[in-house]
Structure formats: structure tokens, C-alpha cells
Amino acid sequence: MKIHITNIYGLGGTAGKAIQAVASIAKNRLQYNELGVYHYPFGSDSLEMLRTRLDGIIASVGHGDIVIFQSPTWNDIRFDEAFVRSLNAYRDLKKIFFIHDVPPLMFEYGQSGLNRYITLYNQSDLIIVPSQAMADFLCVNGLTVKKIVIQQMWDFPSTIDKTIMPEFQKKIHFAANVTSIERPFVRNWEYDTVQLSVTAKEEECGWARGKNVGFLGWFHNDSLLLHSLRKNGGFGLVWHDDPWWVEYMKLNASYKLSTYLAAGIPVVVSNSKAEKDIIIRKNLGLAVDSLDEAVAKVEAMGEETYHQMVRDVEAFAVLIRKGYFTEKLLTDSVFQLLYD
């Protein structure tokens, strides 16, 4: 029996990084076999071309194997459905679906779109989901898979300069695209006592003139981003003011959250965020109902309280930097699949 895991190439951004990071840990630590998938315009394939493409991807798969399918591939659900149909042809093959995102919950597909994804998920023998809230939501909406593993937290494999310790700053960082994507809470920042620091260049943000907004610059390299966040201290913010995304963030695990923790800085999240309980229980930052509350808590915080948070974040961040969450959930998934 061999264990395989899908990986995707040609997909940028956070989604691509997350899929590749999981596959790297699976291959290098657990010796799983990679099934390489390329991100491409699905509509360009004829049925024969798609069949040939899939045959090439799964050529190393055999009867009785286990395949961990990282979902979605972002190639269109029709590609994912065809991929799973190809796997179903193998006798005694078991499928684990590692759900990173559920597109109908991210974008307004409607209930029919969600039903189609759940029908796809129901072909798995075990499913990995970001949070218990996501598991509950999918079950209410038709998920019938009985074996479920909860991810809880993204890893962010990385190394940091431990000679630099985050300093107490009344500053909140927001590491995201704020130039081409308009984010109202960023552009309307009106707090004089706590600075909002963004990953952008000042000359690209005319809207920030006269506001208490700082600039870290834009980073194409994760190591440089972590170094900048760590060097600047303060807090990392996971926030959204789009109602649709606010609802989705109640269910999914945030890669950005793990970015801040890997850098070694405490975080600020909404009380509705899926990872909120871990953050509070492990003293990794603040959970609040509003930005007004976040600013008030940062403003009132003392230096020793902040440094204790930094120490607690540093202890926890070892798990994220070393990829232990991913290694554990993959191992737990295979164990539960074969043992329970």
C-alpha cells in the first residue's frame, strides 16, 4: 500500500502556498508520493485530453492505496469531479479529502453550488476540515462522511532570527493587499493612539494622508515579511468587513493568522473567528467584537502583559514553523482511516 497526496503547480497566492506546504511536509517527512496537478484553464481540454491528463497524474496509484486529495484544485469543480471518478476505478482505494476552502462559501454560488461540492466530499472515506464549525456546517448541509479530522491551525514552515524579539508597540499590522483591493476599515482608520501598519508602499496609498497609518512595504518573499513583522513588534490583525467573508471566517482556518504567529507577534482576531478559542486559551493575542474594542485593549495594555504574550506566542510558534500541525493531522487521518 502506498499513500499519495496531490500537489498543485502554477497557482500563486496563499492558496498555492498552502497546498504546496502541505505536500512538502507529506513528501519529505512522511514519504508520501506526490500526485502533481497543474493549474490550467479547464475549458481548454477535450474529454480525451482530460482523460489523458488524469491518467498521467495518477499513473503511480495502485489498488488498495490511499490518496489524500487537497481540495479544491482551483481548476474548476468539473476537473475535481473527473479526478475523483478516475480514483474510483481502483479497487479498495481509500480517499482522504483535505478541504482547504469551500468555494461556494467564499463566493455567492448559491445552494446548488454547495450541494455539488458536498456530493463530491461524500465520495471520500475521511475528510479533513479547517474547524469544528465547518464540520458542523457541512453535516447540516448533507455531508455523510463519518470520519472527520479537524485541522485547527495552518502551519507556516519558516525560520526566524531569534536575536530579534518583538517590542511592545501600540501598533497593529495588517499584512494583505490594500492597494488594488479596497478595504473600508483600512481606508477609514481614524484611531490616533494606535497605528495601523500595512504591507504597501506609501507612494501607492494617497488615501492614507493625514491618517495614523504606517507602511511596511510589499514583500514577495515570506522570510522578509516575517522579519519585518518581528522587527516592528506590535500585533497582527486578521479582519474583514465584507459580511460574506465575515461569515466564512467563522468556518475556515486563516493562513494569515499563522503568518503573524510564525513571526512571533500576538494577534487580534474577531470573537467569531474559528481559531479564537486557541488564541485565548494559549494567550496568543486578543479576541474582540470590534476594531474600537481592539484599539482600546491595545491602548490599555502594559508592556509586561505584551511581553508575556510574546513569550507564549514564541512557545506555540515552534509548532507552526516546524510543520507539526500538518504532520500530526496527516498521520492522525491515516491512522483513523485504517484503525478506527
Image: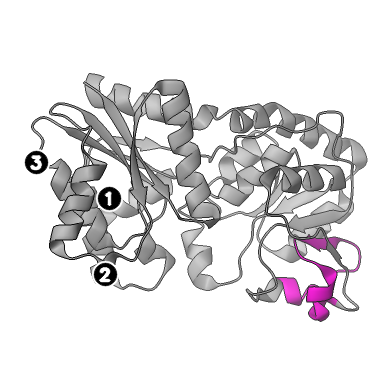
The answer to which image quadrant residue 240 occupies is bottom right
**Pointer 2: residues within 10 angstroms few (<14), some, or many (20+)?**
few
Which of the two marks, 2 or 3, is nearer to us in this view?
2
Q: Which residues are magenta?
A: 186-208
Residue located at (70% from left, 73% from top) = 179
- Sequence-earlier tag: 1 or 2: 2
Q: Nearer the viewer, residue 272 or 244?
A: 244
**Pointer 3: residues within 10 angstroms few (<14), some, or many (20+)?**
few
Q: How many marks?
A: 3
The circle on residue 139 is 1
Query: Which residue lies under the disc numbered 3?
Result: 89
Mark 2 vs mark 3, CA separation in Å: 24 Å
Task: Pick the quarter of the image with the N terminus.
Answer: top left
- The secondary element bearing badge 1 is classed as helix
Residue located at (63% from left, 41% from top) = 279
The reply to whether the magenta stretch includes residue 205 is: yes
Residue located at (26% from left, 35% from top) = 67
The answer to which image quadrant residue 159 occupies is top right
Q: Are marks 1 and 2 in contact (CB under 8 Å)?
A: no
Query: Which residue lies under the disc numbered 2?
Result: 43
- The secondary element bearing badge 2 is classed as helix
The image shows residue 256 at horizontal and vertical percentages of 61, 51
Mark 1 vs mark 3, CA separation in Å: 27 Å
Q: Amino acid at mark 1?
A: Cys
Q: Nearer the viewer, residue 201 or 301?
A: 201
The answer to which image quadrant residue 160 occupies is top right
Horizontal side, residue 311 vs residue 102: left or right? right
Horizontal side, residue 154 vs residue 94: left or right? right
